[in-house]
Amino acid sequence: RPDAILHAQFFAEDGVVFYRDAYQSGLHSLFLTYGGYFHTLLRLTALFAQLFPFAWAPLTMNLIGITMQVLPVNVFVSSRFSHIPLRLRLLASFIYLALPNSFEIDANATNLQWHQALLGCVLLLGQPALTRAWKCFDGAALLLASLSSPMGILLAAVAGAMWWKRRQGWWRVSLGVLSSGAPIQLVSIVRHWNARQVPHRDLWGHLIFNGGPRGASLHYFAAILGRQVFFSSIFGLNAQKWLLVHYLFFVDLVLCAGGLFFLLYALRNGPAELKFFIAFAGAVFALGVMNPLAGTPDHPQWYWLCYPGCGNRYYFFPMLAFLASLLWLANSKLSACVLRYSATGLLLLLPAGIALDWQYPAFYNLRFQQFAAGFEHAPAGTTFRLPVNPGWLMELKKH
C-alpha cells in the first residue's frame, strides 16, 4: 500500500485520539489511558510527530509504524538466532512481511502494538543479550511493550517460562523489566473493566458500540479458526471470499481440525521456543475473541469475525504460529515423513495467497494536504475538523 508513504493520511485513532491528545495536552498525554490501559509507544510517536509541520505528521507516524513492523525481522536474522539456519530465517522473515490476511495492521501507527508485541516475543525467544547495545535495546523495547498494551502481561509470562527453562539471569532481568509495567496495565484494565461508554474500547483499543452479544458457538469457532486463521494464512483474504461463496460448514470443520493438528503436534514435539510462541499466540487470540470488536452490535461479534476482512488483528499471532509450526515440521528430521511432506506441500501453496493479497487498496483520499494547509494558516484558537479514514472526524484547536 504505497499510499501510506506517497499520500500519507491519519488512520483511525492515530489522528483522532493520539495526535489530538499530544497536540492539545503535550507530555501530559503520556499519562492518559485509552480503552482502559496505557499506550506509551503510540503516545511517544504522536509527541514525536509534534516536532514536524502538521502536514508531515501522518507520514511521520506511518514511518514509525512501518519501522516497528520491520524490527522483528532485524532481530530474527541477527546472531541472536544463529542456531536456526539463515536461509530458513530469511524465508520466515519474508513470509512474515508478506503475510496474507493482515492488511489491517500494515503500515500504520494505530496498530503498531501488534508488531511491538511480536518484537518483544522475538527478543525473549532468542539468545540472551550479551553486548551493552543489545541489553539497552532489549530493556527499552520490553519496558515500552509492558507499558503499551495488555500483551505486555503475556510477555511477562513468556519471560518467566524462558527463565524457568533456561535458568539464565538475562531472562530474570527481562521478567523484572516487564513486571515493572505489566501490573500498571493490569490495574488500569481492572479499574476500567466494568466501564460502559458509548462508544467504548475493547482490550486492544478498538471501537465497540456498547458491546453487543459475542455469540460464541462451535459453528462460528470452526469458521474463525478454519477459514480466517488456517485457510487464510495460506491462501489469503481474497481466496477466502471465494470460499465463502461456496460455503460448506463441513469444509470449516476439516480446515479447523487439520490446522489444530499441526499446531498441537508442534506444541507437543517442537523446541521450547516454538512451544512458548504458540502458547503466547494462543493466549493473545483467546483474550481477543473473548471480547472482540469486529462489527456493529446488530449481529453477534463472532458472526462478524467469520466475515472476510473483519478482525484481521485477532488472527495475526495465530497465523504466525501456524506458519511457524509448518516451517518447523517441514525442516524437522525427527517428524514422520508424511507430516514433513504435508507441511512442505502447504508451504508450497503459500505463494498463491501472498500473490492474491499482495496489493492492498489505498485509503480513500480525503485531501489531507488541503486541510493541513488551511490549518497552518488558521488563526490561533480556531477549531478545525477534518475527516479521517475510516469515516471518522478529527478535531483540533489551533495553538
Image (spheres, rainbow, N blue to C red):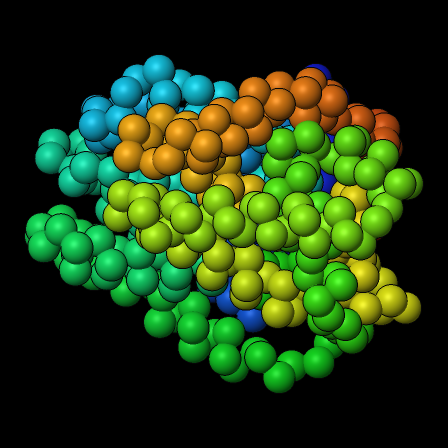
In percent of the image, x 56 and y 20: which residue is there? 348
* Foreground of the two, 268 or 225: 268
Q: Can residue 244 be seen in this view?
A: yes
Please determine whether, in this image, residue 213 is positioned above or below residue 81: below
In percent of the image, x 74 and y 35: which residue is there? 237
Q: In which quarter of the image is residue 316?
A: top right
* Foreground of the two, 372 or 278: 278
* Foreground of the two, 316 or 28: 316
Please determine whether, in this image, residue 39 is positioned above or below residue 128: below
Residue 269: image location, x then y, percent: 32, 47
Please determine whether, in this image, residue 75 is positioned above or below residue 277: above
* Foreground of the two, 149 or 88: 88
Residue 360: image location, x then y, percent: 74, 26
Q: Quadrant of residue 103?
A: top right
In percent of the image, x 73 and y 70: which residue is there? 217
Residue 310: image location, x then y, percent: 76, 49
In percent of the image, x 39 and y 46: which residue is there? 266
Number of numbered callouts drawn: 0
| Quarter of the figure that contains the N terminus | top right
Q: In which quarter of the image is residue 296?
A: bottom right
Q: Can residue 373 be seen in this view?
A: no
Residue 187: image location, x then y, percent: 43, 77
| Horizontal side, residue 185 vs residue 213: left or right | left
